[in-house]
């Protein structure tokens, strides 16, 4: 079953479109997965997979800006986190809990919901300090803005989903 959260109720709603069939969500998740894997395995090939996905979907100019913001955001997550971040392989069609928080964070920022974004950041990183949460949220904000500038808006996420 493919499902998404209803914008008003936060309840799961069946849909014919899988979440990662949407360009915006796919770019966020694949980019995050590939950057995390690149750091974990010390392999530039992981980052090249992400770059190719971004360049294909966004074109070189939008990909360059968005990719730079993605890289900075992922690095800030890695620096602030107090837990192991879990990700599926880049080609997986499902999302795990941490990837849901990633999507929730970016979506909240695109919708201008700073409180929800900070909550998603906390659940993702478990960072105990406010300045660490702020750093990650600000970096995610630049990425969210770059995606919007490239015409990619995520499905809105409600507090009930987070």
Image: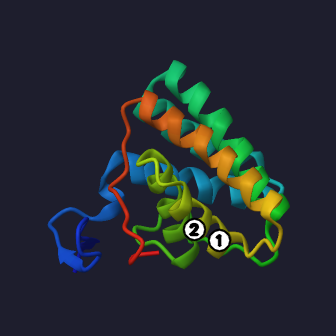
At numbered mark 1, what does the secondary structure look like: helix, strand or loop? helix
Q: Looking at the image, can residue 41 be seen?
A: no
Alpha-carbon span between mark 1 and mark 2: 6 Å
List x then y, in percent, for residue 51.
59, 37
Number of marks in the rendered image: 2
Crowding near the residue tagged with mark 2, few <14, some 14–19, many ≥20 C-alpha atoms within 10 Å? many
Residue, disc 1: 124
Front residue of 48 and 139: 139
Q: Say which element carries label 2.
A: helix
Which quadrant holds residue 36? Answer: bottom right
Q: Nearer the viewer, residue 57 or 131?
A: 131
Residue nearest the observer in this picture, 92 or 64 = 64
Asked where in the image residue 47 lies, by quadrant, the reply is: top right
In the rendered image, residue 24, in percent from the top left (x then y), is placed at: 39, 46
> Could you tell me residue 44's position as x and y percent?
76, 45
Nearer the camera: disc 1 or disc 2:
2
Place residue 114 in its image quadrant.
Answer: bottom right
Query: Horizontal placement of 153 versus 39: left or right?
Result: left
Q: Quadrant of the N terminus?
A: bottom left
Q: Find residue 56 and report its horizontal and vertical position in percent.
A: 44, 32
Residue occupying the point 63% across, 54% down: 34
Q: Is residue 88 above or below residue 50?
A: below
Q: Is residue 76 left or right of residue 145?
A: right
Image marks 1 and 2: residues in contact by CB distance under 8 Å: yes
Residue located beneath label 2 in the image: 120
The residue depicted at 59 percent of the width and 69 percent of the height is: 119
Residue 126 in view = yes
């Amino acid at each position: 079953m493919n499902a998404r959260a209803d914008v008003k109720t936060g309840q799961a709603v069946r849909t014919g479109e899988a979440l990662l069939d949407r360009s915006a969500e796919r770019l966020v998740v694949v980019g995050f997965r590939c950057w995390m894997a690149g750091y974990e395995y010390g392999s530039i090939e992981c980052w090249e997979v992400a770059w190719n996905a971004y360049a294909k979907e966004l074109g070189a100019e939008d990909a360059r800006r968005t990719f730079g913001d993605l890289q900075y955001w992922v690095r800030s997550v890695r620096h602030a986190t107090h837990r192991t971040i879990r990700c599926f392989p880049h080609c997986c069609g499902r999302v795990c809990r941490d990837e849901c928080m990633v999507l929730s964070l970016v979506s909240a920022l695109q919708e201008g919901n700073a409180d929800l974004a900070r909550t998603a950041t906390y659940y993702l990183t478990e960072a105990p300090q406010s300045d660490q949460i702020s750093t990650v949220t600000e970096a995610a904000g630049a990425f969210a803005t770059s995606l919007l500038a490239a015409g990619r808006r995520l499905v809105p996420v409600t507090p009930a989903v987070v």
